[in-house]
Image (tube, grey):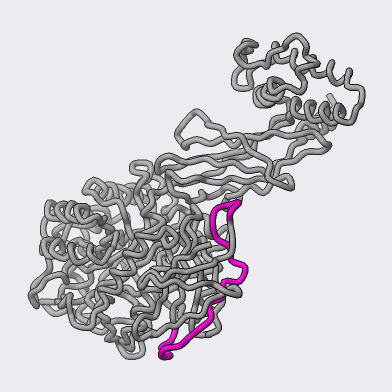
Amino acid sequence: MNLAFLAVADLAAHRIYVEDVYPTVDGGRFAVKRVAGEPVDVWADIFRDGHAQLAADLVWKAESASRWQRMPMRLDANDRWTATFVPPAPGRYQYAIEAWTDVFGTWRRDFETKQKAGLDVSSELQEGRELFASLRHTPSPLSNSPRSNDRWAPPIVPGFEAACDDTLLSNATRLAARNAFKNDLIRSPAYPLYADRPLARASAWYEMVPRSQSRQPGRHGTFDDCIARLPDIASLGFDVVYLTPIHPIGRKNRKGRNNALRAKPEDPGSPYAIGASEGGHEAVHPELGTLDDFRRFVSACIAHGMEVALDFAVQCSPDHPWLSEHPEWFRKRSDGSIQYAENPPKKYEDIVNPDFYGGHSSELWTALRDVLLFWIDQGVRIFRVDNPHTKPLPFWEWLIREVQTVDPGVIFLSEAFTRPKVMKALAKLGFSQSYTYFTWRTGKEELQAYLSEITRYPEREYFRPNFFTNTPDILPFHLQSGEPWVFKARVALAATLSGNYGIYNGFELLEHAAIPGKEEYLDSEKYELKVRDWNKPGNIKGYIGHLNRLRRSHRALQQTANLRFAQVDNPHLISFVKESASDDDTIAVAIALGNFGSVEFWFHFGDIEIGPPGRRGRVREIENLVTGARHSVQWGGVRLRITPDEDPALLFRCLA
């Protein structure tokens, strides 16, 4: 046997090439992210040697399904083919491309060309007869048994020659092309896709510390206090109420006010020091209420059109029940003590971390998965994961798949302020949304550069940013002035640049007292109880509510990737255009990045075109979303006025 000859023969059998498949992430290693119920456009370069015509199908299915569905692909241009499918429900999907030589289409093309040229086509007619006749004995491409001719083979009628220009023959050749035995059929690898529910792509988050929702100084807040706050939060247009950890707090090495190493008897400790004699990750802090009280809170949120997000912090206080029940889950020091958490030079004596790679790691991983499943049973479908970059990356890929197999609608937010490639890796592994560097980006050039990075291909296929203006850990320097315009500008940037954004409670009250020289809140409620007047004079609640109402009214603002920056003749202004995925809603935005008084500026659209395919055109008119005033676009732009003290953001509907 000539092995070299066999290798050549095998190579010769694979003459069709499928290349540059879009969309994919790392060649199909990770899933592309989309939204259930919306079209997914798939593209690929498909070609072969010679001049024969090709045919191709896009095949797709739910990952757990056995049967593939197929959509015919069409040739667009330059050997680029495309087709569309719609994943009907949240979950994991696969798609692939099949291509083969269209023998009948090639025959028909050549026959018509020669016939129109006045050439003798008698040989071509005979070849056509033989091709069509062969279908009587050709097995079905989907089974090993032949189908009857009257079910799928094109008819062979008297006067075959006369029928060559007839619609019957045109339909017959198309039918034959799709059903004939495909001798050189090639199939691409299967590429993964995850279809989320819409809230994964567009959501407005309100972060609150439950124990600080009391109206009485010195009294620990309860779930009933949280429920009482929901009408106000809902009126601001938020979709997600995110709670910092609600579990019992350890007493050993408890932190005092302002992160003091020694706590006073009345100090509540950090909610991130999870676990005490009352329970661990599946328990609620007794001063907040009971598990039934928490379920009432979840139901109340749903009644107000919002969902609950819980903090999932994979860490334990020294008092956590797991340390006595499962000491093998924790790493011990040489003296036999369990090692507390540290990030040199910082030390966190009130926290210890499980050992993910210890001898009992499989039990630990399963226990952590079961914690999430427990809270899903209580009605929670969104989790903000604390510091995922400090835990094994394979753990998150496994955990997210395990949980979403039970409930495909569960959303995971990655709180990883770390190196860019690690942040992107976490998104690839399955996190639905990701914290970003937006919190620190203030200048025009750095904002545009960062948004251009996370909205390019392939980042836009897997990385969904969530722009938080502030967090309990981060009070950015630019907010420490307390000026209303900068708070408005930052929330306007977050709400319009990103489909997902969030604020930490107190932002709406312009809270800005910082530890001198640090981006940290003075008297942080991470270490003490706070009582606020949620209608404090000077608040910007109305402004935030207005932005959220605009987001809900305009699909262009409910996504991030379809973003194009425009030109303005002022270095302290940023401008951009966002267009909905369906191309039926376009919004132009200009936001002041400095308080320079009232100024006029030129908003230039350049070569930006809007509208559905085939009808796209330049912007000809814009309509102010607040005042309703309309401005005609002339010479590619329009002159506008902005006054940051009054409103640092202008939003317009674009008309083509």
**x and y percent of residue 485 in the render?**
35, 83
Residue found 48% across the figure and 51% down from its top: 33
Q: In which quarter of the image is residue 386?
A: bottom left
- Work out whether residue 428 or residue 150 is closer to the camera in this orientation and state it: 150
Q: Is residue 293 left or right of residue 48?
A: left
Decide whether residue 37 is among the magenta residues.
no
Residue found 41% across the figure and 71% down from its top: 624
Quadrant for the N terminus, please: top right
**x and y percent of residue 249 in the render?**
19, 66
Residue 656 higher or lower than 259, as above or below: above
Q: Is residue 166 left or right of residue 447?
A: right
Residue 376 higher or lower than 512, as above or below: above
Magenta-drawn stretch, dominant element (helix, strand or loop): loop
- Work out whether residue 584 or residue 522 is closer to the camera in this orientation and state it: 584
Q: Is residue 15 left or right of residue 603?
A: right
- Work out whether residue 155 or residue 503 is closer to the camera in this orientation and state it: 155
Decide whether residue 599 is among the magenta residues.
yes
- Magenta residues, as a range? 593-615
Residue found 44% across the figure and 49% down from its top: 35
**x and y percent of residue 443 in the render?**
49, 82
Mark yes or no: residue 273 visible: no
- Work out whether residue 586 or residue 615 is closer to the camera in this orientation and state it: 615
